Image (cartoon, rainbow, N blue to C red):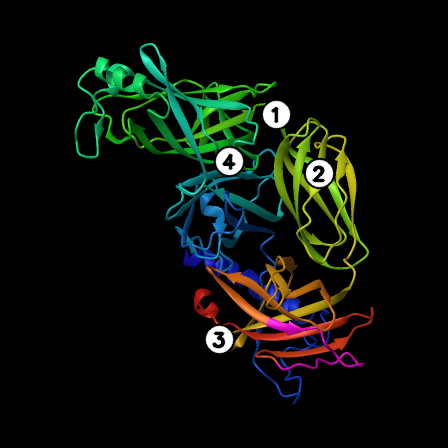
């Protein structure tokens, strides 16, 4: 790995020379001269702009749509697993985060395309959450955001199923009122237990429940309501994704959706909690009840990095019942699709989330668009069909964006017009970040970052730095906080948008901040930040 690091560092150094003498204002006109004294100084400014494919991974709890801040372990497998790097140019066997987010990049020396995509699977483990895996294929370089929706082991919607007599067996149907009772489902998951098995089940004390079927049926007939109850914890609301599925034993990229993840919480019979099936079994089946049956539907599990989906019954011989119910379309996808041209009345960086629906109003997939206006972004792994793209209204700097009707997701160019929200002003931020233990080295990050009004509950506004420079929208006379991830920790700073009539910065700060008007009438905010983290150590400097 040292050779890999040295390979990147040689390129970084060559980019440093270009960056030092390129026009980013007088802050960088001659970085080897002290701006106040004019004396020579030894300063190396490192730019990460060699990384052309930058990836943001967000870990989200599907039950509340909030980012998971518990300690998470993330790693990669698959064809291109070794090509996923940190911004220090390193391949780590695994990554740790307690912030629900990771910033990684692809090896810039690895070429990929529609015919030979960057192909890998991301795995996530978080205590009290179910293990997670998702295959990802990337066909074009650029800025990518992946929202990974994890299901907690418990804490979903509780559903109680009531056992009913069905001859030789008991079958279970919906009983009582549940949180999800008002949601119309297009499927059913059913359970059955043979009576001959049921009488041998054991309770918490290790005792069998009944001595015979006749004894059990006498108890059931005296009080059938609630005699047998299965209590399940259900998680729904997963977004559609594009992942590998198995079709007739062959792996292909398809539109895939988890419909439900379920866990058995408890089984009670005649008021007694079952702890041991004692050689018996519970049979689980699924049925699609909607008008249009998916190409693939059923219980899903991962085999060799692809989802195997089957509607065959599943037999359980213990109470550790956990399942994924999923559907998929096997229609061919376009690896490279239509192009969206993002335009605005403001020059600013942007990060915009969107949901894509087909002509029938069904959610196809979710996606994120990131760049600086004007920017053209090509869709990837989309179906050959018409769609409506609905942009989420979660960026406080922008007015609500009108939905976009697309004739065909696989071809064409479409314009997306974005307006700045009232009261937001354009600024240019230039960030020079010094290593905490090496003042002669500074970084000019090419990085995804976030900002918001200090101490507010506003959603974080996604911004995208290139060479430490970023155009932003902010309100006048406000204090802002800005953050970006270095490895597994947020690096924080603050700045103000209060200036005098000449554009000079007015407020004190822990960082050295200056400002000035530039030729286009905007104010440039120059931030000299000292890393709290040992960035130079991470880079082996």
Q: Where residue 165 sits: x, y (%)? A: 35, 15
Secondary element at tag 4 = loop
At 79% from the left edge and 50% from the top edge, which residue is drawn?
343
504 w.r.t. 395: above or below:
below
Residue ID for mark 4:
236
Mark 1–mark 3 Cα distance, whole angstroms, equals 51 Å
Residue ID for mark 3:
436
Q: Is residue 499 magenta?
A: yes
Magenta region, main secondary structure: loop
Q: Any mark on residue 37, and which?
A: none
Secondary element at tag 1 = loop
Mark 4–mark 2 Cα distance, whole angstroms, equals 22 Å
Secondary element at tag 2 = strand
Q: Where residue 404 sits: x, y (%)? A: 76, 39
Mark 2–mark 3 Cα distance, whole angstroms, equals 44 Å
Read off the magenta span. 494-508
At 62% from the left edge and 46% from the top edge, which residue is drawn?
141
């Amino acid at each position: 790995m040292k050779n890999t690091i040295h390979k990147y560092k040689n390129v970084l150094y060559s980019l440093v020379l270009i960056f030092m003498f390129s026009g980013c204002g007088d802050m960088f006109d001659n970085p080897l001269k002290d701006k106040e004294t004019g004396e020579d100084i030894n300063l190396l400014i490192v730019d990460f702009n060699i990384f052309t494919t930058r990836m943001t991974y967000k870990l989200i709890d599907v039950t509340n749509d909030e980012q998971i801040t518990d300690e998470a372990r993330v790693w990669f497998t698959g064809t291109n697993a070794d090509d996923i790097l940190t911004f220090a140019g390193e391949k780590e066997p695994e990554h740790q985060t307690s912030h629900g987010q990771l910033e990684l990049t692809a090896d810039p020396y690895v070429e990929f395309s529609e015919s030979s995509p960057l192909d890998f699977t991301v795995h996530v483990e978080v205590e009290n959450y179910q293990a997670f895996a998702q295959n990802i294929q990337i066909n074009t370089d650029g800025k990518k955001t992946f929202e990974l929706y994890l299901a907690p082991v418990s804490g979903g919607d509780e559903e109680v199923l009531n056992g009913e007599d069905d001859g030789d067996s008991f079958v279970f149907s919906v009983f009582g009122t549940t949180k999800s009772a008002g949601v119309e489902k297009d499927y059913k998951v059913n359970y059955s237990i043979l009576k001959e098995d049921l009488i041998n089940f054991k309770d918490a004390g290790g005792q069998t429940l009944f001595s015979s079927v006749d004894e059990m049926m006498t108890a059931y007939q005296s009080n059938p309501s609630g005699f047998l109850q299965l209590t399940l914890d259900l998680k729904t609301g997963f977004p559609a994704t594009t992942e590998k599925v198995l079709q007739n034993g062959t792996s292909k990229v398809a539109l895939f959706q988890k419909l439900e993840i379920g866990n058995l919480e408890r089984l009670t019979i005649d008021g007694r909690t079952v702890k041991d099936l004692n050689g018996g079994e519970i049979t689980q089946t699924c049925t699609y009840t909607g008008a249009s049956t998916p190409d693939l539907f059923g219980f899903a599990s991962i085999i060799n990095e692809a989802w195997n989906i089957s509607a065959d019954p599943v037999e359980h011989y213990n109470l550790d019942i956990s399942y994924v119910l999923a559907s998929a379309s096997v229609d061919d996808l376009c690896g490279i699709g239509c192009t969206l041209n993002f335009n605005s009345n403001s020059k600013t960086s942007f990060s915009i989330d969107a949901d894509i629906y087909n002509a029938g109003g069904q959610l196809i997939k979710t996606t994120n668009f990131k760049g600086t206006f004007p920017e053209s972004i090509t869709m990837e792994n989309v179906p050959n069909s018409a769609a409506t793209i609905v942009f989420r209204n979660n960026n406080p700097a922008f007015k609500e964006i009108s939905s976009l009707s697309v004739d065909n997701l696989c071809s064409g160019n479409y314009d997306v017009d974005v307006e700045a929200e009232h009261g937001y002003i354009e600024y240019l931020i230039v960030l020079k970040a010094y290593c905490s233990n090496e003042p002669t080295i500074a970084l000019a990050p090419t990085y995804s970052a976030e900002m918001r009004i200090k101490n507010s509950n506003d959603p974080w506004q996604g911004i995208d730095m290139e060479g430490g420079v970023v155009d932003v929208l902010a309100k006048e006379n406000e204090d802002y906080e800005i953050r970006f991830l270095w490895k597994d920790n947020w690096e924080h700073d603050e700045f103000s948008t209060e200036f005098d009539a000449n554009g000079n910065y007015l407020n004190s700060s822990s960082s050295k901040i200056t400002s000035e008007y530039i030729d286009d009438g905007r104010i440039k905010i120059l931030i000299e930040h000292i890393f709290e983290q040992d960035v130079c150590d991470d880079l082996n400097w």
